[in-house]
């Protein structure tokens, strides 16, 4: 399965990009780095600059139709930037419209709020997003991983980097079942 990993040009939490990316590769999927600008993505380790990663496609070039699933890594600045970019928001919304699975960790659900796709859904996130998600119509829960299939697609969410092992296992299971269809 081709899996889109959507990040802003700067601010993604590196481990929330690299661990799921490697897990997808190890499972035989094709991860594709999608961003709002071409060139490279500057990752961060909390507030410190970390590595850069080459962008494969921009949201202007990409279509949800070309991917089997979407992974949204966190970092505070990353989803905050994405939710202000109309093309990024539409790209995310299109996965829900098409019924494709989406996985989001940490602060990434901010982009889901902006795409207006969390109403009636159950999810988890970094605790500071609880009020934003509740105000957007979601039911927030404090769990390592939450899998919600009460909507047009399956949504996998996790709270933080400490949950990455469980997050990767859950989204790979969900995406694998989708790929088998």
Image (cartoon, grey):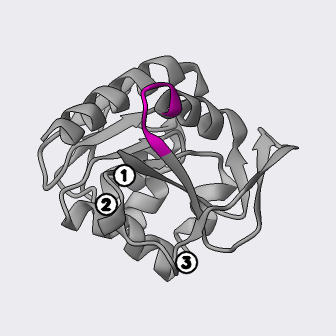
Locate residue 153, reporting x and y percent: 18, 51
Residue found at x 58% / y 30%: 22
Magenta residues (range) = 25-30
Observer-side mark, 1 or 3, equals 3
Q: Residues within 10 Å of mark 3 (few under 14, many from 20)?
A: some
Q: Is residue 88 rendered to the left or right of residue 9?
A: left
**Placement of 153 over or under 166, stated as above or below:** below
Asked whether disc 2 touches disc 3, contact meaning CB atoms under 8 Å apart, the reply is no
User: Is residue 56 visible in the rendered structure shown here?
Assistant: yes
**Disc 2 target residue:** 136
Q: Is residue 131 rendered to the left or right of residue 128?
A: left
Marks 1 and 3 sit apart, C-alpha to C-alpha, by 19 Å
Q: Nearer the viewer, residue 157 or 42?
A: 42
27 falls in the magenta region: yes
**Disc 1 target residue:** 133
Marks 2 and 3 sit apart, C-alpha to C-alpha, by 19 Å
Q: Nearer the viewer, residue 178 or 148?
A: 178
């Amino acid at each position: 399965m081709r899996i889109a990993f959507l990040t802003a040009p700067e601010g993604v939490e590196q481990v929330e990009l690299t661990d799921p990316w490697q897990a997808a590769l190890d499972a035989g999927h094709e991860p594709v780095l999608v961003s709002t600008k071409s060139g490279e993505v500057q990752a961060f380790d909390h507030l410190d600059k970390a590595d850069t990663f080459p962008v494969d496609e921009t949201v202007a070039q990409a279509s949800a139709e070309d991917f089997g699933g979407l992974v949204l890594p966190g970092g505070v600045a990353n989803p905050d930037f994405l939710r202000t970019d109309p093309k990024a928001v539409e790209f995310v919304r299109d996965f829900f419209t098409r019924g494709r699975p989406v996985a989001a960790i940490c602060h990434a659900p901010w982009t889901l709020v902006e795409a207006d796709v969390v109403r009636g859904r159950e999810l988890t996130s970094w605790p500071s997003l609880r009020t934003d998600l509740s105000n957007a119509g979601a039911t927030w829960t404090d769990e390592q991983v939450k899998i919600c299939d009460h909507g047009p697609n399956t949504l996998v969410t996790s709270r933080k980097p400490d949950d990455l092992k469980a997050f990767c296992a859950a989204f790979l299971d969900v995406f694998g079942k989708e790929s088998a269809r």
